[in-house]
Amino acid sequence: MGRAYQNRKESMAKTADAKAKVYSRYGREIYVCAKASGTDPAGNLTLRGLIDRAKKDQVPTHVIDKAIDKAKGGGGEDFSPARYEGFGPGNCMVIVDCLTDNPNRTFGDVRLCFTKTKCKIGTQGSVSHMFDHCAILVFAGEDEDAVLEALMEADVDVSDIECEDGKITVFAPHTDYFKAKSALNDAFGEIDYDVDEIQFIPQTSTQITGDDIPMFEKFMDMLNDLDDVQNVYHNGEVAE
């Protein structure tokens, strides 16, 4: 599971390096999260995780503050989540998560990415059953047993734990995100997480080879260029 997650992160890093795009995505996600569940990070663990992640990705403080202030105002755009699924180049499985104020426009834009790269957008649930929707927490540590014990005592349904190079990675169902994070913080104090996210992790991988490689790169670039797209998850592994 960890390797598949790392492959996806490396793939995303190649196509999400435009600073303005990163700032816009974090700003929109922070705004929606703060508006929905409260603007105080102390009482909104998802918001606190988002802010920590934004800072690690070098998003300026004024971008974060502006998004929270906007949420405090109660007005502004009415963004809603939208998720699209389908099959990309090489028949890899793809999930596209969006935040949109115009679902019809967003669906048309995402569908165009599929059709222009000779891919097929599917119905809801067509590929998501082949992904694990996981909370992922990565932090410095060596004592895997102590971490597992703390999580088990808090009744967290741990999917997997990895310990490598002084880092512990915890995988749990996305529904146990708050419970897992609270249990770790209660057991070990305030933790500086390297990764604090909810992601879709593919259960299997699909090799992308030959002529599908440039098409796959074009497909990913097109999706990541869309303002409404927040995250793209896939099970594609580009052949070396």
Image (cartoon, grey):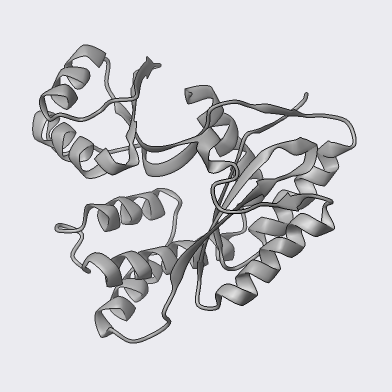
Position of residue 211 measured from the top left corner of the image (x, y, whole percent): 90, 37
65 vs 127: above or below: below
Position of residue 50 measured from the top left corner of the image (x, y, whole percent): 34, 54
Instruction: Kindly tell me whether residue 122 is visible in this rendering.
Output: yes
State the image quarter where residue 93 is shown: top right
Instruction: Kindly tell me whether residue 143 is visible in this rendering.
Output: no
11 vs 65: above or below: above
133 vs 80: above or below: above
State the image quarter where residue 216 is shown: top right
Position of residue 54 measured from the top left corner of the image (x, y, whole percent): 40, 55
Residue drawn at (75%, 51%) of the image: 120
Residue drawn at (59%, 68%) of the image: 227
Residue drawn at (32%, 56%) of the image: 51
Q: Is residue 10 left or right of residue 187?
A: right
The one nearer the camera, 185 or 206, is 206
The one nearer the camera, 181 or 59, is 181
Q: In the picture, which quadrant includes the C terminus?
A: top right
Q: In this view, does 134 lie to the left or right of 176?
A: right
The one nearer the camera, 188 or 81, is 81
Q: How many labels does the image show?
A: 0
Position of residue 8 measured from the top left corner of the image (x, y, whole percent): 58, 36
Q: Is residue 183 left or right of residue 18?
A: left
